[in-house]
Image (cartoon, helix red, strand yellow):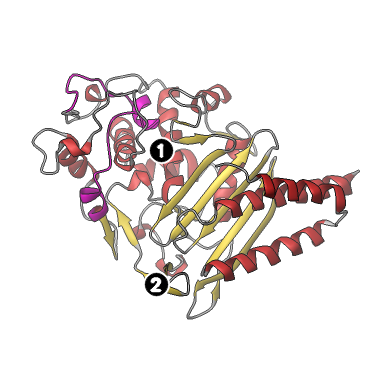
């Protein structure tokens, strides 16, 4: 995610020319977001800006349902797509910290089925490879896209799908499911790889992923409105999802859905809940008086292995975090270690990259809000 020179120049000029109150900055920010929603034909969204142990700003815009005009708020539940992968990363690192598994073990020494790349059958695949998208596992869209199950959670067990896809003799097994490169040689973003990592957490811990993450992450971080499956929640609390049609002039409502490979994008939460998680990672594993992962483990989790931009299911470019895109879903959760500032964005409409510059703008407005509040304390 690169910063626009024009945008940054404009923002820095604001520092030099504007002496606004926090309320004035927030009004300008709200006006900007509302105009952006109108321009992009977005149904609803919510934003949070956090720093230190605090939520500096949290606000919803637009609607959960464009027919009923129910407002979208920071407490609206929605699926967060690939931000989910970071929870799998934390879960794996928890097991590593406890000495239950190792990032560099051959996954075939862990799994009850064999994973084999037919293009390099002798190659060893490790969790470190998988969590950095360097395993050689590829998303074959002819198999992956039909694994979305509209209307309910997927009825296909994760283990069954992975075995069929990754093991010789499986009904979906194919050279097209893997790259021609050996593990560690090529970055290939893989949702199915994330599904495999989540399954390894289940297999090693002996617990379903939803139970495991509730115990070690959601409950300690007071994420009371967070779950994985539609069957776990009151659907009336879930936002409707929309796709933009006819050159962003019309919104089409789509059914809620479940993922067969749910570890790659299945978490459902709120901006309010996810703010606790963002505060936790920004504070190197601490939320209030609760610690999840030792600080050294968090450091290891965010230390690059193969590339300088992604490791262990975390993006570690200029900002640390993850984004997410799925049908009817656009999300982002990022923080700057330098500025000690983090942002969260939920959008209940397919945006597919159109909000990248908006994320930058939100981040810069967060700086202004923080600067303004710091001035009032002087």
Q: Residue at x 81, y 61 (%)?
A: 24
Mark 2, secondary structure of its residue: strand
> Residue 119: x and y, percent?
18, 27
For label 2, count other residues whose C-alpha is less than 10 Å away and answer few (under 14), some (14-19) or many (20+).
some
Q: Residue at x 46, y 66 (%)?
A: 239
Stretch of the chain drawn in magenta: 119-146
Give the vertical position of 241 relative to 345 (above or below).
below
Tell how many labels. Answer: 2
> Residue 222: x and y, percent?
55, 48
Q: Is residue 55 visible?
A: no
> Residue 305: x and y, percent?
45, 22
Going by the image, does 373 lie left or right of 323? right
Residue position for label 2 = 253
Inter-mark Cα distance, 2 to 1: 29 Å
Going by the image, does 72 lie left or right of 148? right
> Residue 278: x and y, percent?
58, 43
Q: Which mark is residue 88?
A: 1
Q: Residue furthest left?
A: 169
Which of the two discs, 2 and 1, sits closer to the camera? 2
Main SS type for the magenta part? loop
Say if the magenta span includes residue 66. Answer: no
Say if the magenta span includes residue 127. Answer: yes
Q: Which mark is residue 199?
A: none
Q: Residue at x 15, y 34 (%)?
A: 167
In terms of image quadrants, where is residue 180? top left
Give the vertical position of 1 relative to 258 (above or below).
above
State which tag comes first along the sequence, 2 or 1.
Answer: 1
Q: Is residue 26 visible?
A: yes
């Amino acid at each position: 995610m690169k910063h626009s020179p024009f945008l940054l120049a404009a923002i820095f000029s604001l520092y030099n020319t504007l002496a606004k109150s926090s309320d004035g900055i927030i009004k300008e920010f709200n006006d900007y977001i509302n105009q952006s929603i109108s321009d992009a034909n977005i149904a609803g969204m919510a934003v949070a800006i956090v720093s230190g142990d605090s939520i500096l700003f949290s606000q919803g815009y637009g609607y959960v349902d464009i027919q009923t005009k129910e407002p979208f708020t920071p407490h609206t539940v929605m699926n967060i797509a690939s931000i989910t992968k970071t929870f799998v990363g934390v879960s794996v690192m928890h097991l590593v910290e406890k000495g239950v598994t190792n990032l560099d073990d051959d996954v075939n020494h862990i799994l009850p089925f064999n994973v084999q790349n037919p293009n390099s059958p002798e190659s060893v695949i490790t969790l470190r490879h998988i969590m950095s998208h360097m395993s050689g596992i590829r998303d074959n869209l002819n198999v992956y896209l039909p694994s979305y199950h509209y209307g309910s959670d997927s009825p296909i067990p994760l283990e069954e799908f992975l075995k069929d896809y990754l093991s010789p003799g499986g009904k979906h097994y194919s050279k097209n499911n893997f790259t021609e490169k050996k593990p560690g040689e090529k970055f290939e973003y893989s949702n199915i790889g994330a599904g495999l990592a989540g399954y390894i957490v289940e297999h090693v811990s002996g617990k379903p992923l939803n139970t495991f993450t509730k115990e070690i992450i959601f409950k300690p971080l007071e994420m009371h409105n967070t779950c994985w499956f539609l069957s776990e929640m009151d659907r009336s609390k879930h936002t409707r999802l929309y796709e933009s049609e006819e050159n962003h002039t019309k919104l089409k409502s789509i059914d809620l859905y479940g993922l067969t490979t749910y570890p790659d994008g299945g978490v459902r939460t709120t901006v309010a809940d996810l703010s606790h998680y963002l505060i936790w990672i920004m504070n190197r594993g601490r939320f209030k008086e609760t610690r999840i992962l030792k600080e050294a483990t968090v450091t290891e989790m965010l230390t690059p292995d193969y590339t300088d931009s992604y490791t262990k299911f975390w993006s570690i470019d200029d900002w640390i975090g993850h984004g997410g895109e799925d049908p009817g879903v656009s999300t982002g959760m990022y923080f700057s270690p330098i500025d000690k500032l983090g942002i969260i964005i939920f959008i209940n409409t397919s945006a597919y990259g159109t909000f990248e510059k908006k994320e930058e703008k939100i981040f810069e407005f967060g700086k202004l809000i923080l600067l303004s509040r710091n001035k009032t304390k002087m």
